[in-house]
Image (cartoon, rainbow, N blue to C red):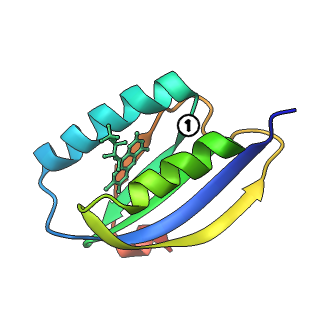
Amino acid sequence: MTQLIHLIYSSAAAYKFSEDDLIDLLTKARQYNGNTDVTGMLLYTEGSFFQILEGEESVVDALFAKISKDKRHTKAVTIMRKTIPNRSFGEWTMGYANVTSEEVE
Ligand SMILES: Cc1cc2nc3c(=O)[nH]c(=O)nc-3n(C[C@H](O)[C@H](O)[C@H](O)COP(=O)(O)O)c2cc1C
């Protein structure tokens, strides 16, 4: 049986992301996530990323291993990784929000 998990991490952007940088990242991410049935949400605030990845355990772990090596950010730290009964972002191959730190809180 395949196991559904979500993995939440934070990281530090390696440089200041422009809107074009973010659109480029999201366009490719959404394509890959759509093909592998990964859903989730990406937040970018004041040089930090927070991302929630949902999907089949081995797929999410492999994707996070790849994302962790991406030179566009550093210090990727797992905040939570656990099995879930259902997806919270089932409609989104990767939702996106540019938020303030107050909103993240
Ligand atoms: C903050 C951040 C979040 C990312 N999120 C995803 C994602 O959800 N899905 C994805 O396929 N790639 C994501 N990427 C990009 C991957 O690190 C990688 O560049 C992409 O999967 C292409 O891999 P490839 O070079 O093997 O084709 C993200 C990168 C960063 C910096």
Measuring from the top left, give residue 27's x and y in whole percent. Answer: 28, 32
Q: Quadrant of the N terminus?
A: top right
| Front residue of 45 and 68 | 68
Residue 100 in view, yes or no: yes
Residue 43, above or below 62: below
> What type is the residue that disc 1 sits on?
Thr
Residue in view at x 54 percent, y 28 percent: 36
Q: Is residue 88 visible to us here?
A: no
- The extreme right residue here reads 1
Q: Is residue 35 left or right of residue 45?
A: right
> Picture quarter containing residue 85?
top right
Q: Tell whether 28 sits left or right of 6.
A: left
Is 91 displayed left or right of 32 in the figure? right
Q: Nearer the viewer, residue 90 or 37?
A: 37
Q: Residues within 10 Å of mark 1 (few under 14, many from 20)?
A: many
Q: Identify the residue at the far top of this view.
A: 35
Rendering coords of residue 31 (x, y %): 38, 26
Front one among 78 and 58: 58
Beta carbon of the mark 1 residue lies under 8 A of ligand 1: no
Residue at the image point whose x is 39% and y is 70% from the top: 11
Q: According to the image, label 1 marks what residue?
A: 39
**17 left or right of 83?**
left
- Residue under the point 60% across and 51% down: 61
- Name the image quarter holding residue 58: top right
- All told, the count of numbered labels is 1
Query: Which is more toward the observer, 87 or 71?
Result: 71
Report x, y in % for residue 97: 37, 51
